[in-house]
Image (cartoon, helix red, strand yellow):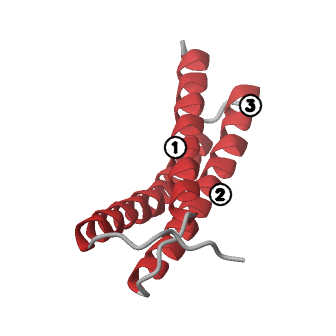
Amino acid sequence: MRRALPATDSATDERAFMHQRTVFSVSSAMVGVCLTAIALIMVYERLSVARAVSRVLLAVDALVFLIGALLSFFALHALVRGQRSSVHVLADVAVLLGLLLMTLVCALLVLTMV
């Protein structure tokens, strides 16, 4: 069951739309970044447990960004129909979680290469 947020002015709706458009495009691009990183790790790989874990974490990270993109898409779709939805909060959380996970993977890779 959807819970619509109270109607607001058009300036707020425009900001919400622009925000979700940004979240959608960034999270979609980050899926590609994760795939590129996985390929680079595979090229550089030396039977290291840390690199194998990094590949798995980046695959999970790509899924997190995909979830963020899908949630943002649904939030955009609701805004286009003139509805407000709380899905945008979940989209923001998914993208932030994906960025956090990617940062942890980067730190893990840097620490294993030292």
Which disc, if any, is residue 66? Answer: none
The N terminus is located in which quarter? bottom right
Residue 87 occupies quadrant: bottom right
- Report the residue at 68% width, 41% height from top: 57
Q: Which residue is mark 3?
A: 47
Q: Is residue 56 above or below residue 29?
A: above
Q: How many other residues sit within 10 Å of disc 3, few (<14), some (14-19) or many (≥20)?
A: few
What is the distance, in whole Å, between disc 1 and disc 2 at their CAs? 13 Å
Q: Residue furthest top?
A: 114
Residue type at the position of mark 2: Leu
Question: Label 2's element?
Answer: helix
**Numbered disc in front, either 2 or 3:** 2
The C terminus is located in which quarter? top right
What is the x, y in percent for residue 82? 41, 84
Question: Label 1's element?
Answer: helix
Residue type at the position of mark 1: Leu
Q: Which residue is mark 1?
A: 96
Q: Nearer the viewer, residue 41 or 31?
A: 31
